[in-house]
Amino acid sequence: MVTGRWGHGLLRLAYGEQQVAGGFWCALGKMEFSMGKNWALAPMLLGCAAIGLPALGLATPAIAEPAMVSQRSTDRANAPTNAPIDATTRANTGQSSPQMAEPRRFTARDVFDLEWADAPEISPDGRQALYLRRFNDIMTDRTRAHVWIVNLDGSGQEPLLADEGSYRSPRWSPDGDRIAYLRSVSGRTQLHVYYLRSGRSALIGSFARSPGSLTWSPDGETLGFTMAVAADSDTLVRSPTPPPGASWAARPVMIDRARYRTNAAGFVELAYTHIFTIPAEGGTARQWTTGDFNHGGALSFTPDGDAILFSANRNPGWELQSREADIYAVSLGTQDRAGGTLTRLTDRPGFEFSPRVSPDGRTIGYLAYSNAPEPFVPTDVFVMDRDGGNSRNLTADLDRRAGNLQWLSRSQLSFTYQMRGENHIGVVGTNGQRRRAVEGIGGTTIGRPYVSGTYDAGAQSTLVYTKGSAQRPADLYVSRNGREQRLTDLNRDLLDQRDLGNVTRFTYSSSLDGLEVDGWMITPPDYQPGKTYPLIIEIHGGPHLAYGPHFSAELQRMAAAGYVVIYDNHRGSIGYGSAFANLLKYKYSSPDDFADHMSAVDWAIANGYADERNLFIAGGSAGGIATAYAVGLTDRFNAAMAAKPVINWVSKVLTADSYIGQIANQFPGPPWEHLDHYWQRSPLSLVGNVTTPTMLITGEEDWRTPMSETEQFYQALQYREVPSAMVRIPGTNHGIASRPSLLNAKTDYTLAWFAKYRVDEAAPD
């Protein structure tokens, strides 16, 4: 097993003339991060003066007067007491005595020193694996990735591509002597092939648009990939050409299509994704698909190299169909034929994708889910004959979301699926026999404790995968014949020197209907049994996603600040079956999920962990919706932080990039036909009840939950003179924590806001 640190520099935070260690200085105006000699604009906090908030300092937070909350003890008639905590985690509580030294707390600076493994790829001979070693570059404020190679017997690893660049999609050639990879240089994406014997790389192609789904042909002579191709649009108006030297206004842009903007890219040009190949020794890329359709997803060559399989929706009116796609094969040209012939292999209603041709070429595995208008539908593993006949579902009784399908042998497929906050690797035979091969992969999301993880299947039924824990981001592991071996320990030098909050699992019953709900609790690193602590409940997004017992930089920093942090997989979460996930059908957000969250809070109070005078609530995306909805139903919380929330569902579905699928699957119909329903689900309908001081944090380029949603709630709260603040993050979309400094900023603003309304222990009840 290999350990080590890949150094990333130093951090200094400064705001104007005020330098703060571990905290933020808040004022109307500009705030800046100092990173060496580079200065980057930080978010602006608006509304400070309106609420008497000249400064938010985390290093020495000012204690506010006790908040006037009148219903701290309400809605707890069904609170359970002495609920059991998972015995597997109680043994390692990390509980300290009053005489124990001050803990070595996890800090914002430590976020820049984290490393984690991702995207393993097993060599054809099964002796080694490539993987991406991700880290946060403190000088560029970006998450970068280097390519490392590790021996699967655990004898060592070494960097393969580890310079100033950032790399993705490393792929072994079939003979194992070359590695294809992608990197971005000067605004273009380059495709390279690295020759292992010589240690040299060849530039194969350079593209203005980024290739995806990079795949070797079976003979190693060709690389397949997907790439967007610009399309011609109808011109309604032909404008005159300005004379030489003239300075005219930018020309108007006419849009006449349903899908015209994405959260990732904003307004997008008219382009469609197609299938390409390029010679592995360099040459001209050749496009094999045509038409105004998107072709892509995972690619799979047939063993003879005569065709590539992919997924596409080529139906008329495809733009308004969010759950329709079929498996196609496109023939590749030879000296004897032109190629480019499409064969449709599936035609069932629903979404078929991720085709994988078996090693012998006789069978095709693929994933599929139905087009039922439900918020959640399971994804199953299917197989069919090479010609598309004899299709059959191998996981009909699993009732989970299968993913990352691969052939493990000639008769077995491996895949991922979620179960109660964990991600597992399952194996199913073409005869339908199924088993769990690996439990608990994950660790590839470091901000919040989402279920995650990647893996690769290789020779001799070898599985290499990422796996973390509540105390560690992802390391690399290998499993052979059911025996697991850890290959890396990337954060031992950092996290062995930190006292992290202990994570324990608990279950509780919802006060709504007695539904059993999973929850997790993080206690402060200096936690003392019998003492109560301020509590933060943090709510996951989705809502059809899930948290689990996984490392979380954001939540560990909250625990380091002295909070007990709880989070739950409320009704609507995945990993518990379709019935559980769809309990929120036409009900997000609602008093139903609110009851689940409040019951978790009451569990923490009843079992002696939480100080009921100091209750706080936070969440992002769907968790932001739940937070904004909750403060309209209760005044028990001292303060709230809603990140990137939906506030008004009527305006949201008609301004966001996700409107097509959301209207079809999460609502009974469009808002002009069901206005009352949309309003009932909207936190804005309850804003007249809100007294809780509320902060909102959203990216200014968010097109998933647009900034206009945040502004509606902020202005309503300001109009009602409710203490409120709006944090706008420039140049950022829905992924407001996508850069490490912004991940820290989100946590810093949250903690500073909560510190303002935190009640001193010495204050009277």
Image: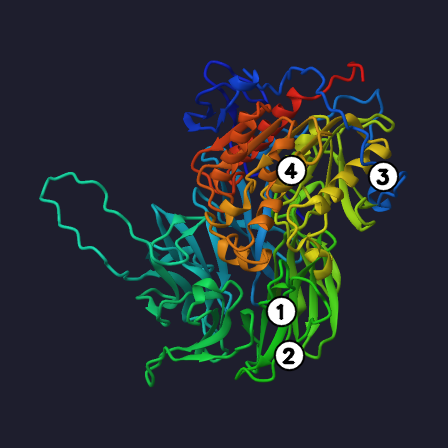
Q: Which mark is residue 670?
A: none
**Of residues 368 and 197, the one drawn nearer to the viewer in this rendering:** 368
**Amino acid at circle 3:** Ala
Dot 2 or dot 4, earlier in sequence? 2
Q: Nearer the viewer, mark 1 or mark 3?
A: 3
Here the colouring is rainbow
Please report the residue visible at 53 percent of the width from the left and 19 percent of the height from the top: 50
Q: Is residue 687 visible?
A: yes
Q: Which residue is mark 4?
A: 627
- Where 606 falls versus 175 (above or below)? above
Residue 79 is labelled as 3
Which comes before the other along the chain, label 1 or label 4? Answer: 1
Q: Is residue 448 left or right of residue 388?
A: right
Q: CA distance from mark 1 to mark 2?
A: 26 Å
Which disc number belongs to residue 459? 1
Foreground mark, 2 or 3? Answer: 3
Q: Secondary structure at mark 1?
A: helix
Amino acid type of the residue tagged 2 in the rendering: Arg
The residue carrying mark 2 is 392
